[in-house]
Amino acid sequence: MAKQGKLQTFLEYAAAKSVLSTLGHLPAPAAMAIGRTMGKLAYFLAAELRKTGAINLRLAFPEKTEEERAELLRQCFDNLGRQLGFFSQFSTRSLEELQSLTEPHGLEHLEAAKAHMNSGVILFTAHLGAWELTSFGPSLFGHTFSFLVRRIDNPRIEDLVDGIRVRFGNKTIDKLSAARSMLKLLRSKGMLGLLPDLNTLDAEAIFVDFFGVPAATNFIMAKLALRTQSPIIPIFAPWSEEKRKYLLLIGPPVSIESTGDEDEDVRRLTTQLSQHIENQIRQYPGQWLWIHKRWKTRPKGEPAIY
């Protein structure tokens, strides 16, 4: 069994490295075009993921027709493939080449937060567009930070991907042992990146509306911001079909209200952040990760959705 496990690890790694290396040595437009083709193929092969996506889109957009929702689901797979092609460029292109592939907006918000911070800074994003760019992108422009990741089960693929993510000075924090690390980082005036848009287990979640449906949402970011007085800055990386490149959109800090009632303040801020993410998804509805079971955890007594 051990030999079989090692063989599987190697074969998975060899396949991942081969894909990234092949795409990485192609011009970016070609790599992203091939990635989209791979996404289209995955759409036809992944029946269970299509089923999940269809359920999610019915919940989020009941006003749309079946045809409109089906098109958004196809765009979701296209987006995943295009991001793969784009990610492949991260390890092979120079700093200047990578900067030219990205159009940043709002870097001044990040610079201002760093210049005046009495504590750390929290950047938050979602699985929208090229979410890997929301961590990698700022490092291209001199803003390195630490961000939370779920380690990939295959350790060789994890080392491969992690090496790309930290190429220009970023650091990754293992999600499984993150609580103390995040607090320590913010109290030492560091920058922390988080993605709070996925389903969360009961112990780490509160239910707030997401597209009008109660969703188990991680409250840790709100609690960290309130306890450390760290500003929260939104950052998203949608694809612009018009400009044929990814945008790096950095907004002004989110308004934070502290009344002294921590539970209520955490709920209010978590709701506010979830609404901010929803607004971004509504602007780019074909670029969010609809194949994730966002509403899997349900309030007590409610039936399962999936």
Image (cartoon, rainbow, N blue to C red):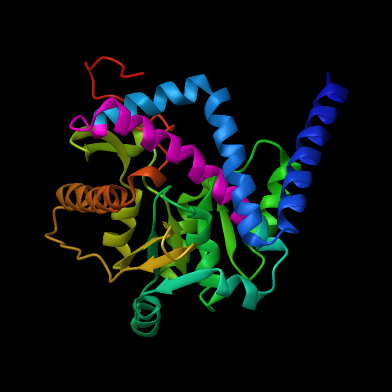
Of 237 and 156, which appears nearest the observer?
237
Does residue 107 sit above or below 34 in this rendering? below
Give the x, y percent position of residue 107.
40, 77
Q: Residue at x 85, y 29 (%)?
A: 7
The image quarter containing residue 116 is bottom left
Kindly tell me whether residue 295 is visible in this rendering. Answer: no
- Residue sitting at x 33%, y 24%: 55
Q: In the rendered view of the protein, which quadrant contains the N terminus?
A: top right
Picture quarter with the C terminus: top left
Question: Taking 5 as reference, is 233 left or right?
Answer: left
- Residue 176, image x, y percentages: 53, 42
Q: Is residue 84 magenta?
A: yes
Q: Nearer the viewer, residue 288 or 100?
A: 100
Q: Residue furthest left?
A: 259
Q: How many marks?
A: 0
Out of 33 and 295, give the one closest to the viewer: 33
Question: Could you say where residue 260 lies in the image, as x and y percent from the top left?
Answer: 14, 58
Pick out the residue farthest to the right.
Answer: 3
Residue 170: x %, y % from top left: 59, 66
Q: Is residue 20 left or right of 198 when viewed as pictured?
A: right
Q: Residue at x 83, y 30 (%)?
A: 6
Residues in magenta, as a range: 60-87
Q: Residue furthest bottom?
A: 115
Residue at (31, 16) in percent of width and height:
304
In the displayed structure, would residue 23 be above or below residue 53?
A: below
Quadrant of the image occupied by residue 292: top left
- Give the vertical position of 48 relative to 137 (above or below): above
